[in-house]
Image (cartoon, rainbow, N blue to C red):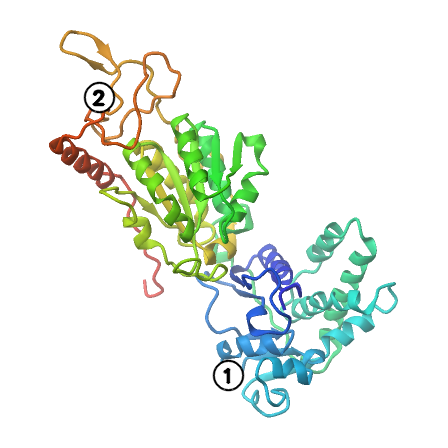
């Protein structure tokens, strides 16, 4: 059930697997409801982990092991399990009422429907309560540690290190030492159960993936965390303050949470009253000389589209981070679908071309953030960074780069006049372009002599004055497209098992 602690269990198993040196890919999956009805199919919260001694690219489609904490968890996931897979079930939860709630007329543990699998019936709840009887806990409090019992059992099955999890539990429950001790006891009881029961005759060893990783210092990282770190790194490499104007939305909110912790790096986060205010503030920060970012998902992109068009017209650097989820409308908030590609490419009025950068893995979100910032700053354009819920919440090992590996992103601000009129007067033209990039100068407000007019109405080439001339409009449309077409990007790297 949502609230049973499966995400925490998955996170801990993942952390120990990463520290052991396996390659891994994760798929957390949880309901959109804050607390879905107990024991129902929509309320199932799961955490899938694929790990190996070689390079792997996805969390996989067919798990080898399923730990089902209740009938709903079994029903929701049994369709993905290949024949011969191992299924560990918490028999204490398979009551008649719980089974009927998800459509089981008879017990699947007894009617032969699981004959094609290696079934391990384990009374997880009873064993956990028994293991914790020496602690001064109510039965309900003791039952809450059954996720740690399950984690201990799986840690034994796959020879995972135990010290890190015990240290984590002591730290997490530092203010409640009794709860910490109870969780550690449940964890050890699960390990000992695997060691002593005859039901588990086999344990598995998965060696570190030494050949999959170049030398370096690694950590486990999720896509949203990598993206947040990438934005901070881009800000430092550009020597610009980072400004995030955002409105909370699943699955992008983690970036707002994370960046708000890093004021020491000159990061300013602004939680606006709505999506439109969030991007409006970010575009204002870009005008003011900041590395400006707004984060959202598909429904928010729809609301932000007019301001993205304004950024195209003003030709200011702005990062629009879209962590995609299923649509249409508000769709499937906690489920993944790459639902916004056409909206990102074409979802604006008029000719408003915008480059789109898409990371390929959770760790690649760091590099994608740097690349999006490079393009935005060099070409003076809004840039879409198109991630999704699977990358955002999934995790994998990431090699922490050295600072000298990061690109120099420092932009050149306009310092003085850049154009001479026929009468010899030197003036500042806000839409005079760099011949290489076609980028216009970036003038920070308040710089003497660089006053200029901005706004959403079409600009005259060079001067930036309002222009309704059709030939000028045609020229500006073609110029903005040529600027995007001329962006220098590295060739695509293809990763194909056949070579």
Q: Which of 129 and 212 is in front in this view?
A: 129
Q: Which mark is residue 37?
A: none
What residue does disc 2 label? 463
Residue with the most extreme top position: 424
**Mark 1 against mark 2, which lies toward the viewer?**
2
Q: Which of 369 and 443 is in front in this view?
A: 443
Give the CA separation, mark 1 to mark 2.
Answer: 70 Å
Answer with left or right where residue 271 lies relative to residue 495: right
Q: Answer with mark 1 or mark 2, whichever residue precedes in sequence.
A: 1
Q: Position of residue 12 (x, y in %)?
A: 64, 59
Q: Which of 431 and 190 is in front in this view?
A: 431
Q: Where is residue 302 in the image (x, y as percent from the top left)?
A: 37, 49
Residue with the most extreme left position: 471
Residue shown at 41%/39% (left/top)?
370
- Up-down relation of residue 493 to residue 285 (above or below): below
In the structure shown, which secondary structural element does the residue marked by tag 2 occupy?
Answer: loop
Residue shown at 53%/36% (left/top)?
269
Q: Position of residue 401 (x, y in %)?
A: 49, 41
Answer with left or right where residue 289 lies relative to residue 143: left
Residue 16 seen in this snapshot:
yes
| Occupied quadrant, residue 488 | top left
Residue 406 seen in this snapshot:
no
Q: Mark 2: few, some, or many residues within 10 Å (few <14, many ≥20)?
A: some
Can you say which quadrant of the picture contains the C terminus?
bottom left
What residue does disc 1 label? 83
| Occupied quadrant, residue 201 | bottom right
């Amino acid at each position: 059930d949502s609230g049973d602690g499966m995400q925490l269990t998955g996170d801990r198993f993942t952390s120990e697997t990463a520290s052991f040196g396996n390659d891994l890919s994760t798929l957390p999956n949880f309901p959109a409801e804050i607390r879905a009805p107990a024991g129902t199919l929509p309320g199932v919260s799961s955490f899938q982990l694929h790990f190996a001694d070689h390079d792997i690219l996805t969390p996989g489609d067919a798990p080898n092991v399923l730990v089902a904490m209740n009938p709903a968890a079994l029903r929701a996931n049994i369709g993905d399990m290949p024949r011969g897979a191992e299924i560990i079930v918490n028999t204490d939860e398979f009551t008649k009422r719980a089974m009927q709630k998800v459509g089981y007329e008879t017990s699947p543990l007894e009617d032969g429907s699981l004959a094609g699998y290696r079934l391990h019936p384990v009374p997880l709840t009873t064993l956990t309560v028994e293991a914790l009887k020496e602690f001064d806990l109510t039965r309900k409090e003791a039952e809450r540690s059954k996720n740690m019992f399950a984690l201990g059992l799986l840690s034994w099955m796959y020879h995972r290190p135990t010290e890190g999890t015990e240290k984590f539990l002591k730290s997490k429950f530092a203010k409640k030492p009794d709860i910490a001790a109870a969780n550690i006891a449940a964890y050890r009881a699960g390990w000992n159960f695997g060691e002593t029961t005859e039901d588990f005759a086999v344990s598995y060893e998965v060696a570190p993936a030494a050949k999959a990783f170049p030398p370096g210092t690694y950590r486990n990282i999720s896509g949203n965390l990598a993206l947040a770190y990438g934005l901070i790194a881009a800000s430092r490499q550009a020597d610009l303050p980072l400004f995030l104007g955002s409105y909370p939305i699943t699955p992008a909110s983690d970036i707002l949470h994370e960046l708000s912790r890093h004021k020491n790096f000159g990061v300013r986060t602004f939680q606006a009253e709505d999506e439109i205010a969030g991007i409006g503030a970010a575009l204002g920060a870009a005008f003011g000389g900041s590395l400006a970012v707004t984060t959202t998902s598909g429904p928010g992109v729809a609301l932000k589209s007019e301001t993205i068009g304004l950024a195209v017209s003003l030709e200011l650097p702005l990062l629009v981070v879209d962590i995609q989820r299923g649509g249409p409308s508000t769709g499937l908030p906690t489920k993944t679908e790459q639902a916004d590609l056409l909206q990102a490419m074409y979802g604006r009025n008029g000719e408003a071309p915008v480059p789109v950068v898409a990371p390929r893995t959770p760790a690649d979100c760091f590099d994608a953030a740097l690349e999006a910032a490079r393009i935005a700053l060099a070409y003076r354009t809004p840039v879409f960074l198109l991630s999704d819920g699977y990358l955002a919440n999934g995790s994998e090992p990431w090699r922490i780069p050295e600072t000298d590996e990061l690109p120099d992103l420092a932009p050149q601000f306009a310092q003085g006049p850049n154009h001479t009129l026929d009468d010899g007067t030197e003036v500042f033209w806000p839409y005079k372009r760099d011949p290489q990039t076609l980028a216009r100068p970036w003038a920070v407000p308040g710089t003497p002599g660089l006053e200029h007019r901005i706004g959403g109405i079409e600009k005259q080439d060079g001067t930036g004055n309002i222009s309704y001339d059709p030939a000028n409009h045609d020229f500006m449309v073609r110029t903005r497209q040529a600027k995007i077409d001329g962006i220098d990007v590295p060739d695509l790297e293809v990763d194909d098992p056949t070579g």
